[in-house]
Image (tube, rainbow, N blue to C red):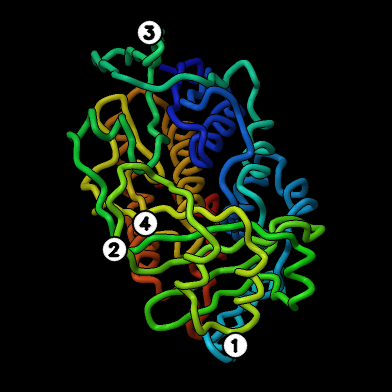
Amino acid sequence: MSQTSRIGIVGAGMGGITAAALLQRAGYDVVLYDQAPVFSRLGAGIQFGPNVMKILRHLDLEARLEAMSCLPDHWTSRKWDDGSIMANIPLNAERARYQAPYITIHRGDLQQMMLEAIDPDRVKFGKKLAMFHDDGRSVALEFEDGSQDRVDILVAGDGINSRIREILFGEEEPLYTGWLAHRAIIPGAAARAAGADLNAKWWSDDRHIVCYYLDRDQDEFYLVTGEPGEWTSATGQMPSTRDALRNSFRGYHPLVQAYIDATDDVTKWPLKTRPPLPRWHQGRVVMLGDACHPMKPHMAQGAAMAVEDAAMLTRCLVEFGTEDLDTIFDRYFDLRRDRATKVQAISNANTWLRAPEDPYWCYGYDLYGVPMA
């Protein structure tokens, strides 16, 4: 195989889109499949640190995203009741050190701009993977709508409930962590009137709420929580209420109560994870992101790790070729395993930036500076 190899990527999340865009730029014949019928502005907030922005720079997206995002100078951790500062970690205040910005943005706006880095003809919506067959020479794909396709390499970017992972390693339910999350978007004017921080996390012993703006003009302000609770539904998200959110954070600082009072549409979803895998590939099929190392969202690095995976996988294919896929995919795994596992463990523990610490090992990471040999 050569760079004319056809590479299929399942899942148009951040990792899948990044893989498609970078591989397309490298000259590969890429096709990106997603089960959604069309693109829509779903989800809520997301944070991308300098470690990710250095990768998106290679897609000419860094400046465009910076122009539309909120750029917090610091990450502020506050005590739940009196609002006292537990940690105030420099972000864009130390941009020169990190060599890239730290942004907060609406996930849908980010996803739409990233999709623009891919030839639209290469993006296939309404394609939910049902089965694949790897015959050692190529991978045949079967979709639920009855259509079929064939690729030389298959990349799984299809998330924590990955169909590809199930086919490779057997069906196994993700592990519910005992935590759920509420989320809501409120008007930025209400947040500004209350005196909101640009980016803050309010902590008590057993729960937290993260609050930040989603755009440069501060029109939208995002609330997302982490809290213990039961989850018995088979669905991945459910409607909730302002009263449920208020009850979960009863006694929190008046500023948090002002945020909650401004909510309208509130949802909740379960926080799930999986144990680390001993390998991320089999034959001509390779995984990235939540398909192989899902985590609780408490470092705001889950999507970031998927983007890093996509960039490293692209580097491996470009620098080593595609003749010996077992060796190439093993190298990709070796280059990514320790970092992804470390982030997964810290994120699941929910200790990140609660107290003063230097996050440079995470945000200062430059994937393109990692030696490949």
Label 4 to label 1, Cα distance in Å? 26 Å
Q: Is residue 33 visible?
A: yes
At 66% from the left edge and 36% from the top edge, which residue is drawn? 112
Quadrant of res 236:
top left
Amino acid type for the residue under numbered disc 2: Gly
Name the N-terminal-most of marks 4 and 3: 3
Label 1 to label 2, Cα distance in Å? 27 Å
Can you say whether 336 is above or below 362 in the image? above
Name the N-terminal-most of marks 4 and 1: 1
Residue labelled with disc 1: 83
Image quadrant where one finds the N terminus: top left
In the structure shown, which secondary structural element does the residue marked by tag 2 occupy?
strand
Amino acid type for the residue under numbered disc 3: Gly
At 35% from the left edge and 43% from the top edge, which residue is drawn? 160
Can you say whether 313 is above or below 207 in the image? above
Amino acid type for the residue under numbered disc 1: Gly
Using a 10 Å C-alpha cutoff, classify the residue at mark 2 as few (fewer than 14 neighbours), some (14 to 19) or many (20 or more). Answer: few
In the structure shown, which secondary structural element does the residue marked by tag 3 occupy?
loop
Picture coordinates of residue 3 (x, y %)?
A: 50, 20
In the structure shown, which secondary structural element does the residue marked by tag 4 occupy?
strand
Q: Is residue 128 left or right of residue 366?
A: left
Disc marking residue 178: 2
Name the N-terminal-most of marks 2 and 3: 3
Label 1 to label 3, Cα distance in Å? 56 Å
Name the N-terminal-most of marks 1 and 2: 1
Label 2 to label 3, Cα distance in Å? 38 Å
Residue labelled with disc 3: 146
Residue labelled with disc 4: 271
Q: Is residue 62 left or right of residue 208?
A: right
